[in-house]
Amino acid sequence: MRGYPCATGVSIVDIDPLTTGFPDCLEAIIESPGYPTSYPDDQCEWVFSTDTVRASVGVTFLDLDGVTGDRLEIIRTRIQNNGVTVTDDIFDDDLTEANIPTNPTLRTRANMLQVIFTPVENRYHNAGTACSSSRTVTLVSGFPTAALNSPNYPSSYPAGSLCFYTVTSPADTRIVAEFIGLLRIVNYEDFIYIYDKSDASNPSLLRIVSDGFYRDFSLVETDSNNVQFVFEDRPGTQQAGFFVRVRYEGECIKVSERIVA
């Protein structure tokens, strides 16, 4: 678990239909701290649970507080049978204000669900130290790809560390990131924050990638030729890392190179 309880006395919500007398459905509403106004730059969590393997948990996201970049993590689902854990899946659903309208409901077959609110905004932009000897990677014609390594990949690196790369490519191109070697077995705590730096004064958060989520997608396409990748290693029993290959595509063909039929 991470963060503090989202509300006093609401850290655990028991929605067991067998003990409540509501066999079909029991609804609980949770709010992020200070909703609907802005809330502190911190994390908080709830845990929903039932006592029977026959029960399941569904979460519908109604709205967030309007602060750009906030994220909801669905960090853990657990199915128990008579108190014995039979499955224990850890994952991140990467839900932000940007994609909640198209994905408003998450349903699981689990009887235990942990939900964490993380206010992200732009606090990680330019965060941490250099990931390598150079913070800036420039993709140029003839060398259209480059590798981004989190510190000391693939060996462990210090828990709680942050570092970043800024990647640029020629005008009229877009940067594509391929997550190739996310070295993590348990915990799923590390993240990459991807920012569009087209407007340097106001970078926008494009995507948050966790090492627990890479099996579901390995490619992130952007519409920018100026992108920043911030690597975050959160404390855990295994500090491993990321390996990302970046490339660009879509460079305009020069008039002199066009073939006229």
Image (cartoon, grey):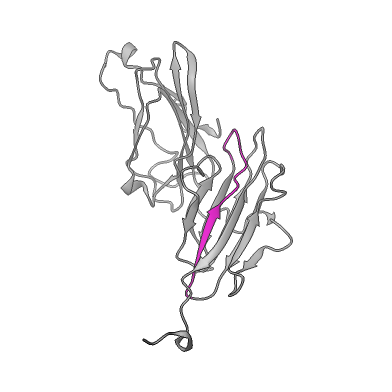
Can you tell which quarter of the image residue 22 is in? Answer: top left
Measuring from the top left, give residue 180's x and y in whole percent: 57, 50
Q: In this rendered view, identify the residue nearer to me: 85 or 141.
A: 141
Q: Position of residue 107 (x, y in %)?
A: 35, 33
Q: Specify whether 110 is left or right of 168.
A: left
Name the residue located 66 percent from the left edge and 43 percent from the top edge: 160
Q: Quadrant of the C terminus?
A: bottom left
Q: Which of the 4 quarters of the picture holds residue 95?
A: top left
Q: Is residue 90 above or below residue 100?
A: above
Q: Is residue 73 above or below residue 195?
A: above
Q: Nearer the viewer, residue 146 or 131?
A: 146
Give the total number of marks visible in the rendering.
0
226 vs 161: above or below: below
In the image, taking residue 164 as reference, residue 121 lies left or right, namely left
Q: Which residues are magenta?
A: 172-189
Q: Is residue 183 magenta?
A: yes
In the depicted structure, whether residue 95 falls above or below residue 202: above
Query: Where does residue 28 sit, x and y in percent of width and height?
Result: 33, 27
In the picture as drawn, the residue positioned furthest to the front comes out as: 261
Residue lying at 72% horizontally and 43% vertically, measured from the top left: 155
Q: Specify the quadrant that holds the N terminus.
A: top right
- In reply to whether residue 248 is colored magenta, the answer given is no
Majority secondary structure of the magenta segment? loop
Residue 190 drawn at (x, y percent): 59, 43
Q: Residue at x 46, y 78 (%)?
A: 252
